Image (cartoon, grey):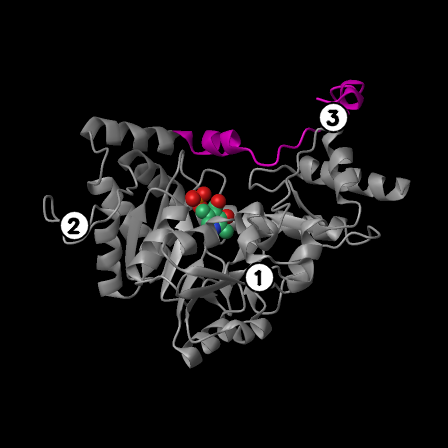
Amino acid sequence: MSSSALNMTAEQVTAVPFADLHAQYLSIRKEVDAAIAAVIGGSAFIRGPFVQEFEEQFARAIGVRHCVSCANGTDSMYIAMRALGLKPGDEVIAPAHSWISTTETITQAGGNVVFCDTDADTFTIDPAQIEARITPRTVGIVPVHLYGQPADMDRVMAIAAKHKLWVLEDCAQAHLAKYKGRTVGTFGTAASFSFYPGKNLGAMGDAGAVLTNDAQLAQRMAMFARHGGLKKGDHQIEGINSRLDGLQAAILSAKLPHLARWTARRQEIAAEYSRLMSDVPGLGLPVVAAGREHVWHLYVVRLDRRDELAAHLAARSIQTVINYPVALPFLPAYQRLQHLPAHFPVAHRHQSRILSLPMFPEMSAAQIRAVSDAIHEFAAAA
Ligand SMILES: Cc1ncc(COP(=O)(O)O)c(C=O)c1O
């Protein structure tokens, strides 16, 4: 805790963590404890009924026929791209602003990453810039529903259809988000999900899944994730070992019935933040495009004095995060592509101006108010 926070009385400090996984656990403790006990009681640690049950329930919740669970969201993207048949030299278009899983898996699967700038309002891939990046070697597009807001899927899917490209939706931050009334994950050739603990639907460890309506693709993905075989000892290809374990599956099944309620609460908190802070000078509030239902994995504001605001909030025991401080093309990992800020001006401008505020369903009205008050105080002192 900072010295200025220590100088305050206990009543004055409303500490606001960035997220509070323990509060969520306490709110559903009985269900989670019972789920864990059932897995241990049945020694159902690897595959088995809990994994199958979660796969079926999650596929139904999203509205897709097949769910192949795996060890984490990054693996789900890699598994999908390997099963989609990515070959050396193939190009895949992905947004310049995302978490590195979106693009490192393209390279790992043997392809070449082609970055596309993002939309200035929504942080999602700018469809107006996709076609200029398509070459005879382009095979796919990976739109990311970043922060919980759907990408412009009508336009992405129209471009993909015109150029015969596959689409892998990165839904890691967007469980139950909707585009024109339709749940994300139902648009693309396949859709990858992360259940990292802090995600809108989070396990108590690493977990992920990839969904598709294509039965053959689902079979190839399941086979690849299980050492290249669907039956023990029958290895059709060389694969990897990427499994959702029974404990995580049972915990996710216990949490899934609460996801709609948690999502609604995130939406209420976002609305309250936006209402309370609509008059803060110089603060760019999140913009939700028409027809998109945002699920607020992150509530991200924009401002020029971002680092000063983060320090001001930290001094008041309010945690913030930058998602992400360096846009993908400018990371050392992509130095080989020699990208300049002018190639992706929107993503580049955002990297120094974005700040993610605390956002979790268990947030109290006092905590929301404390964040808003501290931001008003910062702006007034400017
Ligand atoms: C946009 C995005 N894609 C992919 C992933 C990968 O998920 P995981 O951390 O489960 O590997 C994440 C989560 O960190 C993410 O935020």
Q: List the residue tagged with mark 2.
A: 229
Image point 68% across, 28% down: which residue?
15
Q: Quadrant of the C terminus?
A: top right
| Mark-to-mark CA distance, 1 and 2 | 36 Å
Q: Which residues are magenta?
A: 1-29
Q: Nearer the viewer, mark 1 or mark 2?
A: 2
Numbered circle sitting on residue 13: 3
| Mark-to-mark CA distance, 1 and 3 | 36 Å
Q: Nearer the viewer, mark 1 or mark 3?
A: 1
Residue at the extreme right: 381
Where is residue 199? Give x, y as percent: 48, 44
Residue type, label 2? Gly
Categorize mark 1 by other alpha carbons within 10 Å: few (<14), some (14-19), many (20+). Answer: many
Residue type, label 1? Thr
Image point 24% across, 27% down: which residue?
40
Q: List the residue tagged with mark 1.
A: 124
- Would residue 57 be found to the left or right of residue 6 on screen? left
Image point 57% across, 51% down: which residue?
335
- Would residue 22 be found to the left or right of residue 52 on screen? right
Is the residue 372 above or below the residue 121 in the image? above
Categorize mark 2 by other alpha carbons within 10 Å: few (<14), some (14-19), many (20+). Answer: some
Q: Nearer the viewer, mark 3 or mark 2?
A: 2
Q: Is mark 1 within 8 Å of ligand 1?
A: no
Where is residue 280? Give x, y as percent: 82, 50
